[in-house]
Amino acid sequence: MSNVISNRYRCPEQFIRTSLTAPLSAGNGYFRFGRDLLCYGRSCSVTPAASADDRLPDLLDEVRIDHAAVQLPFDFTELVDNLTYERCFTNSNGAPLGSSPSPLLSKVYYSVRPFLPASLRIPLQRIYFRGWERIAFPAWPLDVTVERLLETVLLLCMKSRGIDTLPFIWFWPHGASSAAILTHDVETTRGRDFCPRLMGIDASFGFHSAFQIVPEKRYEVAPAFLQEIRDRGHEINVQDLNHDGNLFRDRQQFLRRVKAVNEYGRLWGSKGFRAACLYRNITWYDALEFEYDMSVPNVGHLDPQRGGCCTSFPYFIGRILELPLTTTQDYTLFHILREHRIDLWKAQAGLVMEKHGLLSFLTHPDYLLNSRAQSTYRALLAFLAELESEHKMWIALPNQVNEWWRQRSQMTLVPDGNDWRIEGPGKERAIVAFAKLDGDRLTYTQEAFVSGGS
């Protein structure tokens, strides 16, 4: 059970010892671990509740310390996987539960959507999302349950070993406080034609972005268009196949379509994928031939398929690295919430930075065509430029984050006299950090210089 902690922190495994207090219950359900930490999984001591809205048992008092090990009333790795793999939002076959329209309704909607004026489409969508603010789980506007669980169990492990400081490999290269990526999903011909100007806007703030392109039916994808994106230092990823909302609707259809999706990835040299409208079924990801995916929201109350992974960090789904969407999409902000300020984005950024996670933004050239939307987007870029200069945030392309997180996952900490040394590819960019006990919470400190190298 300890691997999930050592994998996130890249700390020596001998410091992390956990076990179960008793056999696990047969079924999954909800419970608390502390007053306000909501969990989903099996328990060793109580029957978990069927709903997050129920009166939930608190399992924190069930923790036991025995021979420098922490005995937990649940399988900690299973608990984290249940959240990041969205198992509380799926049925026993891994299919999403009741969070998206029926196949027939979806087919009808996507057939007529190009002909629906915004004046009709947007009110219909607001009706569909009505009551979203009453959804208790995941927590709005950002859910960091995974980070809080990891910190809580790590703290218990440190206390069980009688240590107040634990070394680990810092989350981001060169000691960056957190990371951020800018991504643009291109949906229509008008959006495609606006991309060169959008690239210029990004570049004016010193940033490069990832453009997710729909390969078929939505618009012509000329080689010259793709080459311009590359030549200007941006990144190209595959967005679905034809953006009809049905890629993950049926397993056999998915397997037929994914062959074409993978072929476009090879043709374009794309390492990343995103599903249209964030419709997803991660149990099918083994058929995708990409290094990373960007289709799972942190909290999906305002997405057509609800759910959320409850973490602000990258994580692996098999061999694919998931870069979760940790902020609200521009369309949602502008048209569902009717907001053209960046206050929500700032609030989400603050919560991500508090845990040193990944800020990921999804905006659309199609929805940045008017001056008001562009003004809002420029305010976001100015805010990110401030975070980069004053808070040491790493603004990167998605594939740069993918490459770093893969390298870091292979790094190890080894003793070096009274200190620690990092080994593994990419160690020259990594630094040793320390988790320190501060009462009943953890704080982090970094070494003042790079610990990799020779």
Image (spheres, helix red, strand yellow):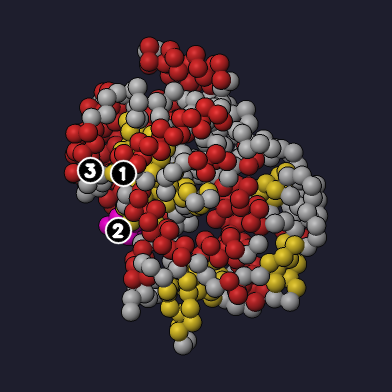
Q: Nearer the viewer, mark 3 or mark 2?
A: 3
Q: Is residue 390 magenta?
A: yes
Q: Is residue 59 visible?
A: yes
Query: What are the residue bounds of the magenta stretch?
Result: 387-393
Q: Which of pointers 3 and 2 lies earlier in the amino acid sequence?
A: 3
Q: Which of pointers 2 and 1 lies earlier in the amino acid sequence?
A: 1
User: Of the numbered discs in the image, which one, if any, rests on residue 390?
Assistant: 2
Which residue sits at x=57%, y=76%? Answer: 164
Which residue sits at x=45%, y=68%? Answer: 411
| Amino acid on which disc 2 is placed | Glu
Q: Which SS class for mark 2? A: helix
Q: Nearer the viewer, mark 2 or mark 1?
A: 1
* Quadrant the N terminus occupies: bottom right
Which residue sits at x=53%, y=21%? Answer: 128
Residue 219: image location, x then y, percent: 29, 23
| Residue 149 against residue 448 in the figure, above or below | above
| Residue 40 against residue 166 in the figure, above or below | above
Category of crowding for the residue at label 1, using alpha-carbon neighbours closer than 10 angstroms: few (below 14), some (14–19), many (at least 20): few
In the image: residue 121, left or right of residue 29: left
- Circle 1 sits on which residue? 269
| Amino acid on which disc 1 is placed | Gly
